Image (cartoon, helix red, strand yellow):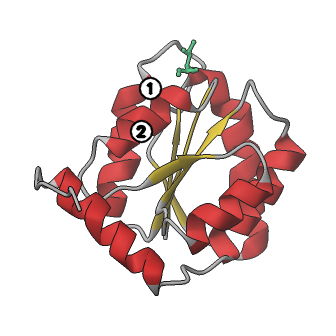
Amino acid sequence: MIAIACDHAALDMKREIKALLDEMGETYHDFGTYTADSCDYPVFAARAAKAVASGECEKGIVICGTGIGVSIAANKVKGVRCALCSEPYSAQLTRQHNNANVLAIGARVIGPELAKMIVKTFLTTEFEGGRHQRRIDLLTALEEGKDIEA
Ligand code: RB5
Protein backbone atom coordinates (compact mmCIF):
# COMPACT_ATOMS: atom_id res chain seq x y z
CA MET A 1 0.00 0.00 0.00
CA ILE A 2 1.36 3.41 -1.06
CA ALA A 3 0.41 6.61 0.79
CA ILE A 4 -0.07 9.53 -1.60
CA ALA A 5 -0.85 13.16 -0.83
CA CYS A 6 -0.61 16.57 -2.46
CA ASP A 7 -1.64 20.18 -2.08
CA HIS A 8 -3.72 22.28 -4.51
CA ALA A 9 -0.66 22.92 -6.72
CA ALA A 10 -0.25 19.24 -7.50
CA LEU A 11 -3.72 17.81 -8.05
CA ASP A 12 -3.15 17.04 -11.76
CA MET A 13 0.24 15.48 -11.06
CA LYS A 14 -1.29 13.30 -8.32
CA ARG A 15 -3.96 12.13 -10.78
CA GLU A 16 -1.25 11.14 -13.29
CA ILE A 17 0.73 9.28 -10.64
CA LYS A 18 -2.33 7.45 -9.35
CA ALA A 19 -3.01 6.29 -12.93
CA LEU A 20 0.57 4.96 -13.07
CA LEU A 21 0.10 3.17 -9.73
CA ASP A 22 -3.04 1.55 -11.15
CA GLU A 23 -1.06 0.43 -14.21
CA MET A 24 1.66 -0.97 -11.95
CA GLY A 25 -0.90 -2.87 -9.89
CA GLU A 26 0.02 -0.89 -6.75
CA THR A 27 -2.68 -0.15 -4.19
CA TYR A 28 -2.71 3.30 -2.61
CA HIS A 29 -4.41 5.42 0.01
CA ASP A 30 -5.00 9.00 -1.13
CA PHE A 31 -4.68 11.31 1.89
CA GLY A 32 -5.85 14.42 -0.02
CA THR A 33 -6.13 17.16 -0.83
CA TYR A 34 -9.08 16.36 -3.07
CA THR A 35 -10.03 19.79 -4.48
CA ALA A 36 -8.30 22.73 -6.15
CA ASP A 37 -9.04 24.98 -3.16
CA SER A 38 -5.94 26.52 -1.66
CA CYS A 39 -4.73 24.44 1.28
CA ASP A 40 -1.75 23.97 3.60
CA TYR A 41 0.71 21.33 2.35
CA PRO A 42 2.05 20.30 5.80
CA VAL A 43 -1.35 18.87 6.74
CA PHE A 44 -1.48 16.49 3.77
CA ALA A 45 2.21 15.58 3.74
CA ALA A 46 1.99 14.72 7.45
CA ARG A 47 -1.00 12.42 6.90
CA ALA A 48 0.88 10.40 4.28
CA ALA A 49 4.15 10.43 6.22
CA LYS A 50 2.45 9.23 9.42
CA ALA A 51 0.84 6.37 7.50
CA VAL A 52 4.32 5.28 6.39
CA ALA A 53 5.86 5.73 9.85
CA SER A 54 3.09 3.66 11.45
CA GLY A 55 3.52 0.84 8.94
CA GLU A 56 0.00 1.30 7.52
CA CYS A 57 1.66 2.10 4.19
CA GLU A 58 4.94 0.70 2.89
CA LYS A 59 6.05 3.85 1.04
CA GLY A 60 4.74 7.35 0.41
CA ILE A 61 4.59 9.92 -2.38
CA VAL A 62 4.03 13.58 -1.49
CA ILE A 63 3.65 16.34 -4.06
CA CYS A 64 3.40 20.12 -3.92
CA GLY A 65 4.47 22.95 -6.25
CA THR A 66 8.20 22.64 -5.66
CA GLY A 67 8.21 19.42 -3.64
CA ILE A 68 10.20 21.29 -1.01
CA GLY A 69 7.40 22.07 1.45
CA VAL A 70 6.05 18.52 1.50
CA SER A 71 9.55 17.05 1.86
CA ILE A 72 10.32 19.28 4.84
CA ALA A 73 7.01 18.34 6.44
CA ALA A 74 7.39 14.61 5.80
CA ASN A 75 10.92 14.59 7.21
CA LYS A 76 9.63 15.95 10.52
CA VAL A 77 7.73 12.70 11.11
CA LYS A 78 9.84 10.24 13.08
CA GLY A 79 10.86 7.24 11.01
CA VAL A 80 10.41 8.99 7.68
CA ARG A 81 13.25 9.48 5.21
CA CYS A 82 11.81 11.63 2.47
CA ALA A 83 13.79 12.45 -0.70
CA LEU A 84 12.88 15.21 -3.14
CA CYS A 85 13.77 13.91 -6.63
CA SER A 86 13.63 15.62 -10.02
CA GLU A 87 15.29 12.84 -12.00
CA PRO A 88 15.42 9.02 -11.81
CA TYR A 89 19.11 8.76 -10.82
CA SER A 90 18.42 10.36 -7.44
CA ALA A 91 15.32 8.21 -7.00
CA GLN A 92 17.42 5.09 -7.60
CA LEU A 93 20.23 6.13 -5.27
CA THR A 94 17.98 7.32 -2.48
CA ARG A 95 16.41 3.86 -2.39
CA GLN A 96 19.74 2.00 -2.67
CA HIS A 97 21.68 4.13 -0.19
CA ASN A 98 19.25 6.09 2.02
CA ASN A 99 16.42 3.55 2.11
CA ALA A 100 14.10 6.52 1.56
CA ASN A 101 10.52 5.56 2.36
CA VAL A 102 8.83 8.72 1.05
CA LEU A 103 9.34 10.37 -2.34
CA ALA A 104 8.64 14.10 -2.82
CA ILE A 105 7.96 15.60 -6.25
CA GLY A 106 7.57 19.20 -7.43
CA ALA A 107 4.60 19.42 -9.77
CA ARG A 108 5.66 22.89 -10.95
CA VAL A 109 9.25 21.75 -11.50
CA ILE A 110 9.00 18.62 -13.64
CA GLY A 111 6.48 17.23 -16.13
CA PRO A 112 4.26 14.19 -15.67
CA GLU A 113 6.31 11.78 -17.82
CA LEU A 114 9.51 12.47 -15.90
CA ALA A 115 7.59 12.22 -12.62
CA LYS A 116 6.28 8.81 -13.66
CA MET A 117 9.81 7.57 -14.45
CA ILE A 118 10.92 8.77 -11.01
CA VAL A 119 8.00 7.06 -9.26
CA LYS A 120 8.62 3.79 -11.15
CA THR A 121 12.30 3.86 -10.22
CA PHE A 122 11.57 4.72 -6.58
CA LEU A 123 9.06 1.91 -6.17
CA THR A 124 11.09 -0.80 -7.91
CA THR A 125 14.57 -0.19 -6.47
CA GLU A 126 15.68 -2.06 -3.34
CA PHE A 127 17.81 -0.81 -0.44
CA GLU A 128 21.36 -2.20 -0.68
CA GLY A 129 21.95 -2.51 3.08
CA GLY A 130 25.55 -3.21 4.11
CA ARG A 131 27.53 -0.06 4.90
CA HIS A 132 24.45 2.03 4.12
CA GLN A 133 22.55 0.46 7.04
CA ARG A 134 25.12 1.93 9.45
CA ARG A 135 24.37 5.41 8.08
CA ILE A 136 20.62 4.86 8.33
CA ASP A 137 21.15 3.85 11.95
CA LEU A 138 23.00 7.15 12.49
CA LEU A 139 20.08 9.06 10.96
CA THR A 140 17.74 7.28 13.37
CA ALA A 141 20.02 8.08 16.32
CA LEU A 142 20.14 11.74 15.23
CA GLU A 143 16.35 11.76 15.05
CA GLU A 144 16.27 10.42 18.63
CA GLY A 145 18.47 13.30 19.82
CA LYS A 146 21.53 11.12 20.37
CA ASP A 147 25.11 12.33 19.91
CA ILE A 148 26.38 10.82 16.65
CA GLU A 149 29.86 12.37 16.59
CA ALA A 150 32.47 9.75 15.59
C1 RB5 B 1 1.71 26.57 -2.93
O1 RB5 B 1 1.53 27.79 -3.55
C2 RB5 B 1 3.20 26.26 -2.82
O2 RB5 B 1 3.79 27.09 -1.90
C3 RB5 B 1 3.39 24.78 -2.44
O3 RB5 B 1 2.79 23.98 -3.38
C4 RB5 B 1 4.83 24.30 -2.35
O4 RB5 B 1 5.55 24.62 -3.49
C5 RB5 B 1 5.54 24.58 -1.11
O5 RB5 B 1 6.70 24.20 -0.90
Q: Which image quadrant for residue 52?
A: bottom left
Task: Check the image and name the residue furthest to the top.
Answer: 38
Q: Is residue 127 above or below residue 33?
A: below
Q: Are marks 2 and 1 in contact (CB under 8 Å)?
A: yes
Q: What residue type is labelled 1?
A: Tyr
In this image, 97 relative to 109: left or right? left
Residue at 64% across, 23% down: 65
Residue at 20% across, 58% down: 148
How far apart are the two marked residues, 2 and 1, measured between alpha carbons? 6 Å
User: Which of the labelled discs sits on residue 7, or is there none?
Assistant: none
For ligand 1, tell me if the residue under mark 1 lies within 8 Å. yes
Task: Check the image and name the residue furthest to the bottom.
Answer: 130
Please name whichever residue, 15 or 68, is drawn nearer the observer in this view of the structure: 68
Res 21 visible: no
* Percent position of residue 141, x then y: 19, 61
Using a 10 Å C-alpha cutoff, classify the residue at mark 2 as few (fewer than 14 neighbours), some (14 to 19) or many (20 or more).
Answer: many
Q: Which image quadrant for residue 45?
A: top left
Task: Check the image and name the residue furthest to the front.
Answer: 150
Residue at 68% across, 54% down: 18
Q: What residue type is labelled 2?
A: Ala
Q: What element carries label 2?
A: helix
* Percent position of residue 77, x then y: 27, 47
Where does label 1 land, which residue?
41
